[in-house]
Image (spheres, helix red, strand yellow):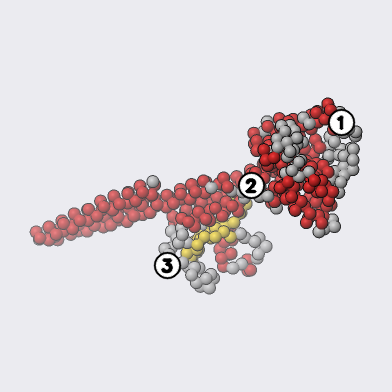
Amino acid sequence: MIESTVQAFSRTKSDSVGSVHEALAMVRGALEQSGGRASWEQPLNQITETLARLESENEGMANELVNVYEQLGIVFEVTHKLAGVESESDVVDLLVESFYRSFGHYEVASVYLNDNTSSNQMSWLQQQVKRSCDRKTVLVEPVPRGAMPASVSEVMIGPIFAGDSLVCAIVVTRTPDVNAFRASDMNLLESLLTFCGDLIRNHHLVGELRDMSFSMVRSLVSAIDQKDEYTSGHSLRVAYYSTLLARDIGVEGSSLQQLQWSALLHDVGKIGIRDNVLNKPGKLTDEERAHINEHPERSYEVVKAIPQLAGALDGVLHHHERYDGTGYPHGLAGEDIPLQARIIQIADVFDALTSSRSYRSAFDWPKALKILEIDADSAVDARLQQAFDRLMRPRLENHSDGWAKMQIEANAFSETTERRR
């Protein structure tokens, strides 16, 4: 729409100027025939010069409008694709891709500076990148002979800053057969780099807030776990095992994050379960069993109060359902049990089996995996059980200290650490 308007504007102006040129030519012809050309020569020349200037200004105005259209197009495209962005490198890649598509006659790349490289070890391009970053401005430089491949005659460089932190620089190169960089190209790049930097800064702030929230909840859950001396660290380990399994079967992005929150909070409702029931060394009575079986729904009510964790509710509520339909609280069976809950159930059972309880000692990991195999398609999803078995055995069988290392990692589980793996 914008582009067609620009083209129409340019065409209308050009047609108008062309019509005046034709009229002037007719006047010149008439004057020549009448013999009065000399007295009108200077005014006609002035009019011609004025028309030439207007024609040039018209072309420049049309070009500027096209540049604005290109800038708006790139900003719109980047904004439209932001939903799929997971990291600052994704933002940079998205900018490079969009910029390249709009300026296909240039080569575009991102460059990351190494702070440990001394000035005399830098290539000419690295020096120009550093100069641009130090000045926090867009630079255009001709390429000296031998400094870059002969096909590159000029570079345009601009830094991306997220707040005060340098992310990287964008380098645009051109070949001799392409028009030189214009001031409008520099302005466009500068605008896009500022836009990109703001996006990355916002991404950082969201990540920092999420990390803080996770740390606070982690501390709260650890305190709840300690109500039962036998389950201290249980929720962290369940979140760790759930993350390993989920990643293995292809869960990623926001779905993975919600699963991590769900696993971490799956037992938060135990804060409302009586201590004498949680820590009872002997067999539970029917009333005590019914009371402890309330904890998934109690956990659900706690988590439901946080709108941002709506995607974590399935695992919280249904992690004690059984694949054969004999579990609780709703007696769901098979794939009617949400995937999030089926993943957490595998992790929950495995950690319960490998942890000591008031009524028994912990099983070793091979025994725990064997029990999960026996329970496949009755208690747990056989497909997930097999995936978990394939995932765990190489990690534990091939290393004498594998189990000890895994327990250290599991007990120190952090959503931030796992997100960066």
Q: Residue at x 54, y 58 (%)?
A: 170
Farthest-out residue, top: 287
Tell me the SS state at disc 2: helix
The image shows residue 324 at horizontal and vertical percentages of 73, 38
The amino acid type, in three-letter code, at marker 2 is Gly
Q: Residue at x 30, y 52 (%)?
A: 11
Q: Nearer the viewer, residue 373 or 58?
A: 373
The amino acid type, in three-letter code, at marker 1 is Leu
- Judge from the rendering whether residue 337 lies leftward or rightward of residue 295; answer left or right: left
Q: Residues within 10 Å of mark 3 (few under 14, many from 20)?
A: few
Where is residue 360, by image quadrant?
Answer: top right
Q: Nearer the viewer, residue 225 or 322?
A: 322
Q: Nearer the viewer, residue 147 or 225?
A: 225
- Judge from the rendering whether residue 125 lies leftward or rightward of residue 179; answer left or right: right
Between label 1 and label 3, give the one nearer the viewer: 1
Where is residue 312, by image quadrant?
Answer: top right
Q: Which residue is mark 2?
A: 253
- Judge from the rendering whether residue 239 lies leftward or rightward of residue 281; answer left or right: left
The amino acid type, in three-letter code, at marker 3 is Asp
Name the mark on residue 284: 1
Q: Is residue 11 above or below residue 216?
A: below
First of labels 2, 1 by sequence position? 2
Q: Residues within 10 Å of mark 2 (few under 14, many from 20)?
A: few
Q: Residues within 10 Å of mark 1 (few under 14, many from 20)?
A: some
Tell me the SS state at disc 1: loop
Tell me the SS state at disc 3: loop
- Judge from the rendering whether residue 163 lies leftward or rightward of residue 224; answer left or right: left
Q: Residue at x 65, y 65 (%)?
A: 118
Farthest-out residue, bottom: 146
Between label 2 and label 3, give the one nearer the viewer: 2
Q: Residue at x 57, y 59 (%)?
A: 110
